[in-house]
Amino acid sequence: MAPLKKFQILQSLKVKYGITISSVQKLNKLLEEMGILKHYGNGWATTKKGLPFSIYSSTQVFNGDLWHGTIVDAVAKHLKNK
């Protein structure tokens, strides 16, 4: 599976799980709640917990824009257990 951009994560959540998240900003907040992203100034940084989901898995990045498809399942699981 090709890496996903955040809008594709939103689409995949809707198709695969019937979960609608209305914006990338809300997805960012959810990923922050999950410990995958951390808000810094005007952007978002991948945390150590987020590295397995990022294609940049060897280093933490600022405003990383590509994610492995497994993030879709992780978000759905988090919402289900909320």
Image (cartoon, rainbow, N blue to C red):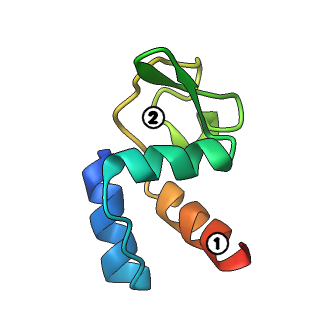
Q: Which mark is residue 39?
A: none
In percent of width and height, residue 41 lies at 48, 14
Of 36 and 58, the residue lying toward us: 36
Question: What's the CA distance linking mark 2 and mark 1?
Answer: 20 Å
Residue type of the residue flagged with mark 1: Lys
Seen at 61% across and 71% down, the residue is 79
Quadrant in the picture for residue 74: bottom right
Relative to 50, is 82 on the left or the right? Answer: right
| Badge 2 amino acid | Ile
Relative to 8, does residue 51 appear above or below in the rendering? above
Circle 1 SS class: helix
Against 71, residue 79 (above or below) is below
Q: For mark 1, what is the residue?
A: 77
* Left or right: 3 in relation to 54: left
Residue 11 in the image: above or below residue 27:
below
Between tags 2 and 1, which lies in front?
1
Label 2 sits on a secondary structure element that is: loop
Q: Is residue 11 at all visible to an observer of this figure?
A: yes
- Please indicate whether residue 76 sits to the left or right of residue 6 in the image: right
Q: Observer-nearest residue: 62 or 67?
A: 62
| Image coords of residue 44 (percent x, y) | 48, 26
Q: Identify the residue at image location x=65%, y=28%.
A: 47
On the image, numbered disc 2 is attached to which residue? Answer: 55
Residue at horizontal 34%, vertical 33%? 65
